Image (cartoon, helix red, strand yellow):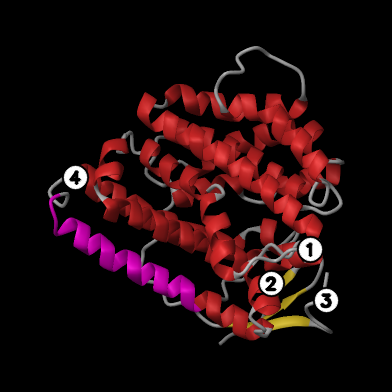
Amino acid sequence: MTKLIDGQVSFHLPEIKRVLPTKRHPSYATVEAENLKFIPSLRRPYYRNGDELACNLEDLHALWGCLVNPSSTTSRSIQYAHWISNWFAVDDLLSDAEKAGCFPEVAEAVISEIVPVLQYRDFDHGEGEHRRAAKSTLYPIYADMPEGIRGRFIGEMLEFVTLYQQEVEMRMRGEIPDFPAYMAIHTASGCWCNTTLAEHGLGMDLTTELQQYPNLRQACRIVHESFVYANDLFSFRKEYFQGDYGNAISVFMLNEGLSLQESVDKLCSLIEEAESRFTVLRRQILSGPLGSRSDIRAYLDELGYCMSGNLEWSYLTPRYHGTGFVWNGQRSGTVVLTPERTSFGDGP
């Protein structure tokens, strides 16, 4: 793969203009404590040693869910924290070139093991650590879902792993898609799961409404786009230094000839535009036939928290910025990336 950057990897991070508020689940401390008890159960299938496990214990997985789905019940928030911890582990396995990231046969074996779980048809204990881990996180969520939303979530999870496998095959070939193709893959890969969980966390089943009202689905799509933009901006360090160019910054640099700084600026602008588009669309929905419904108003508020919460978490998680990282609160200024750590310099 072409080397993207010679010398120090650094750029100026512009301050992202934000219009959506953030909200943290009131029981975050409880959710975090319960999830820290759960994560060690993932060691055998996903972590090669205690050091890898320790890194994941400090990545604030539960905080992600408590910022993205701040209005769910505490019990559901604990379920979601277990789920995202498992799927972060799957993501690490299938994106790391030293694990399964460049080995389609390894990825296929892992995915084949967990597909029956995703389909909600593997009710025996079965064999395989990956299967047991997936079952322990997904089945409590499936069992709590109404039939309509569960059917959608199952389909979304299956699409999630199919696209993971597609990415592994592209990585093996050294293939970098253009930006529209990249976004088509990444907004499908797991993003619908997140907005479906926002719906479930509120105790709703909006299956019919999402079919009948295209603008409601479009609101979800904007959330999905925002997730990719924010994640790729802040996860670039992690992915670049492990040889994974499945990131929008790498796509811009390799396929559009942009510099690192130009790529960062473009992603920041896209994050701002997504928040603005969502705000305008929400206003349009609330001025239409759905606007009188309290459940729709609450759902749109939660989608807004999905966007703002994911961005907020992306600033501060050691998952993206390295073991031992503690965010200094700087939202703009010089950012230096090394294999070990992100350094947020003094702004502006």
Where residue 37 sits in the image (x, y, percent)? 66, 33
In this image, 63 relative to 176: left or right?
left
Where residue 74 sits in the image (x, y, percent)? 44, 34
Determine which residue is flagged by label 2. Answer: 250
User: In front of the other: label 4 or label 1?
Assistant: 1
Mark 4 and mark 2 residues within 8 Å of each other at the beta carbon = no
User: In front of the other: label 4 or label 2?
Assistant: 2
| Type of amino acid at the residue the image marks with label 2 | Ser
Could you classify mark 2 by the number of other residues whose Cα lies within 10 Å: few (under 14), some (14-19), or many (20 or more)? many
In this image, 43 relative to 288: left or right?
right
Q: Earlier in the sequence, mark 4 or mark 3?
A: 3
Determine which residue is flagged by label 3. Answer: 3
Kindly state the secondary structure of the residue where label 4 is placed.
Answer: helix
Q: CA distance from mark 4 to mark 1?
A: 49 Å
User: In front of the other: label 3 or label 1?
Assistant: 1
Q: CA distance from mark 2 to mark 3?
A: 10 Å
Mark 4 and mark 3 residues within 8 Å of each other at the beta carbon = no
Determine which residue is flagged by label 4. Answer: 294
Q: Which mark is residue 174?
A: 1
Mark 2 and mark 3 residues within 8 Å of each other at the beta carbon = no
User: Going 51% across and 46% down the picture, which residue do you hit?
Assistant: 65
146 magenta-colored: no
User: In front of the other: label 1 or label 2?
Assistant: 1
Is residue 136 in sight in this rendering? no
Q: CA distance from mark 1 to mark 2?
A: 12 Å
User: Going 19% across and 45% down the picture, which residue do you hit?
Assistant: 294
User: Going 39% across and 38% down the picture, which residue do you hit?
Assistant: 201
Where residue 144 sits in the image (x, y, percent)? 43, 24
